[in-house]
Image (tube, grey):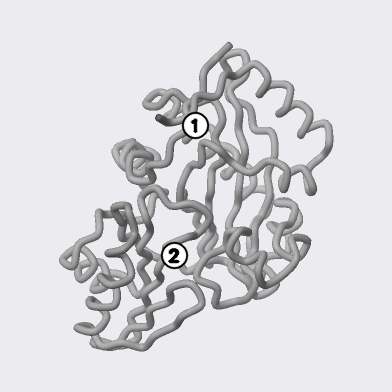
């Protein structure tokens, strides 16, 4: 049986991809958080995100939009604040200082939308008999157009699951922005295999839920990899035979919990 180690470390995954000659162009600019790195990123990008390195389900995520040279919009959970730069830095420090983890600062992406809501794409791959295989896919749309995150765990408080999760091929055909759905699907699949093969050479993993987003021009961005992805929700919008194949393959894998 192959082994699969559960771990949460966004930066370690991002660093591997940023060093890869092909994958690095698909990774948003990312750095460890400091007041200096946040200032630099806000000068360069209109929107940035602060994320706990080991965070789950959108918890602790902060979005900051630069509205003018010295005015910013900060969104943390359901709270939205308009702040000048000095006050912004104080608010950010106050928000993250009580969180027991290091933070990342990451370039924000102007996300493509479906039904006027930003969305991300989850692809689930499993390594079986020495080969990675794509098993299930889905799109997760935010509950409303200005939502700071797209994951279901955050948005399920606002809308039922059937209004948040959709089949990938359907969304690619019906995005609000013009998109070549066949080409984009092929690129997502090809990229997912590149990512899992690369990460598999650096980490002892056999199951990965990969999160991608599209920007409004159709460019694909790789956001993160989850070693313990939610599967039952994917079952609802994928073929039962694909779910069963995943379950059967998973039986051949030993899951190692972190110490």
- Residue under label 1: 196
Could you give the CA–CA distance between mark 2 and mark 1, rounded to whole angstroms?
22 Å
What is the x, y in percent for residue 38? Answer: 24, 67
**Relative horizontal placement of residue 1, taking residue 82 as reference (left or right):** right
Please say if the residues under marks 2 and 1 sit with CB atoms less than 8 Å apart: no
- Residue under label 2: 109
Residue reaching furthest left?
36
**Category of crowding for the residue at label 1, using alpha-carbon neighbours closer than 10 angstroms: few (below 14), some (14–19), many (at least 20):** many
- Which residue is found at the position 26% from the left and 54% from the top? 31
- Which residue is found at the position 36% from the left and 88% from the top? 82
Q: Is residue 47 above or below residue 255?
A: below
SS category of the residue bearing label 1 = helix
Which of 226/133 is in front? 226
Q: Quadrant of residue 126?
A: top right
What is the x, y in percent for residue 95? Answer: 33, 70
What is the x, y in percent for residue 13? Answer: 38, 39
- Which residue is found at the position 63% from the left and 76% from the top? 144
**Relative horizontal placement of residue 90, taking residue 106 as reference (left or right):** left
Q: Quadrant of residue 248?
A: top right
**Relative horizontal placement of residue 170, taking residue 193 as reference (left or right):** right
Q: Quadrant of the N terminus?
A: top right
């Amino acid at each position: 049986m192959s082994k699969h180690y559960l771990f949460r470390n966004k930066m370690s995954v991002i660093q591997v991809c940023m060093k890869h000659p092909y994958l690095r162009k698909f990774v948003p600019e990312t750095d460890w958080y400091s007041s200096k790195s946040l200032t630099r990123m806000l000068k360069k990008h209109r929107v940035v995100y602060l994320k706990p390195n080991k965070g789950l389900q959108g918890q602790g995520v902060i979005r900051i939009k630069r509205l003018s040279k010295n005015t910013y919009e900060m969104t943390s959970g359901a709270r939205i604040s308009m702040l000048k730069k000095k006050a912004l830095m104080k608010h950010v420090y106050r928000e993250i200082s009580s969180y027991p983890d290091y933070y990342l600062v990451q370039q924000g992406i102007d996300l493509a939308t479906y039904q006027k809501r930003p969305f991300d794409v989850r692809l689930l791959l499993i390594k079986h008999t020495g080969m990675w295989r794509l098993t299930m896919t889905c799109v997760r749309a935010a509950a409303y157009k200005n939502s700071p995150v797209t994951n279901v765990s955050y948005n399920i408080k606002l809308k039922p699951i059937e209004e948040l999760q959709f089949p990938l091929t359907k969304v690619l055909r019906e995005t609000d922005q013009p998109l070549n759905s066949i080409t984009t699907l092929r690129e997502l699949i090809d990229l997912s295999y590149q990512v899992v093969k690369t990460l598999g050479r650096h980490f002892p993993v056999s199951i990965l839920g990969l999160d991608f987003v599209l920007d409004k021009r159709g460019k694909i961005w790789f956001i993160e990899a989850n070693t313990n992805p939610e599967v039952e929700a994917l079952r609802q919008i994928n073929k039962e035979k694909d779910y069963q194949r995943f379950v059967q393959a998973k039986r051949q894998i030993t899951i190692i919990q972190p110490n």
